[in-house]
């Protein structure tokens, strides 16, 4: 029969080739404690920059204190833990359970600090004093901020120039109201029926 529709191919259980399978989500490893950082207070260079006229620069800030919170669900006794702050790293070990070495986001006073363990919540809270800017760090930060500020200024100027050029081009393309009122002819010399 010529009007008979072709039979579709049999259905298969294959997934489309363009979709990547999502890997199964791995369960959290209890031997890797969950760590969070909280910044307390701020040390900034605003006062130093005010005298140089650079207060508006995008200078990064430093907290006065860094609070590190470690969730330790496998810790049985606080006496088993070993905590050390050295070389810009927090090192935490509990033999056979935890072994953690994590780079701190700011230089801290390694000789001082406070650590408290909450046995009920199984959370260790470490409070560290962040070191103020050194002269070299402040100069490097000021240079970086100046470069960012200048790049942003140039980008803004380029965007403004592009927007102005577009507006001017759009104005040239606008048909003026009443341009056909001058004798029934357009400027292009086309006769218009009135």
Image (cartoon, grey):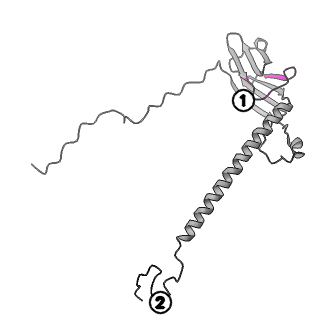
In front here: 102 or 175? 175
Location of residue 87 in the rendering, given as x and y in whole percent from the top left corner: 78, 19
Lateral position of residue 8 relative to residue 79, left or right: left
Residue under the image location 52 percent in, 76 percent down: 175
Q: Determine if residue 19 is in view.
A: yes
Q: Is mark 1 on a helix, strand or loop?
A: strand
Q: Determine if residue 133 is in view.
A: no
Location of residue 122 in the rendering, given as x and y in whole percent from the top left corner: 73, 22
Residue 92 within the segment the image draws in magenta: no
**Where is 127 relative to 172, above or below?**
above
Residue under the image location 50 percent in, 87 percent down: 182
Which residue is the extreme one toward the top? Answer: 95
Q: Mark 1 points at which residue?
A: 36
Q: Mark 2 points at which residue?
A: 183
Q: Which of the 4 image quarters holds residue 115?
A: top right
Tell me the magenta residue range.
Answer: 103-119
Residue 118 within the segment the image draws in magenta: yes
Q: Which of the 4 image quarters holds residue 141?
A: top right
Q: In which quarter of the image is the C terminus?
A: bottom left
């Amino acid at each position: 029969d010529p009007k008979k529709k072709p039979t579709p191919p049999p259905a298969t259980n294959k997934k489309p080739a363009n979709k990547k399978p999502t890997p199964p989500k791995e369960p959290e490893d209890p031997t890797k404690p969950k760590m969070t950082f909280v910044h307390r207070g701020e040390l900034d260079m605003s006062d130093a920059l005010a005298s140089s006229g650079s207060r508006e620069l995008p200078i990064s800030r430093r907290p006065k204190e860094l609070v590190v919170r470690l969730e330790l669900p496998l810790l049985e006794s606080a006496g088993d833990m070993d905590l050390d702050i050295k070389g810009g790293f927090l090192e935490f070990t509990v033999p056979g359970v935890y072994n953690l070495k994590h780079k701190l986001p700011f230089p801290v006073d390694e000789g001082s600090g406070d650590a408290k363990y909450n046995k009920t919540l199984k959370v260790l809270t470490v409070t560290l004093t962040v070191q103020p800017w050194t002269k070299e760090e402040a100069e490097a930060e000021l240079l970086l901020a100046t470069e960012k500020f200048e790049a942003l200024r140039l980008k803004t100027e380029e965007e403004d120039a592009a927007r102005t050029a577009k507006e001017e081009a759009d104005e040239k393309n606008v048909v003026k109201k009443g341009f056909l009122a001058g004798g029934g002819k357009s400027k292009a010399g086309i006769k218009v029926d009135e």
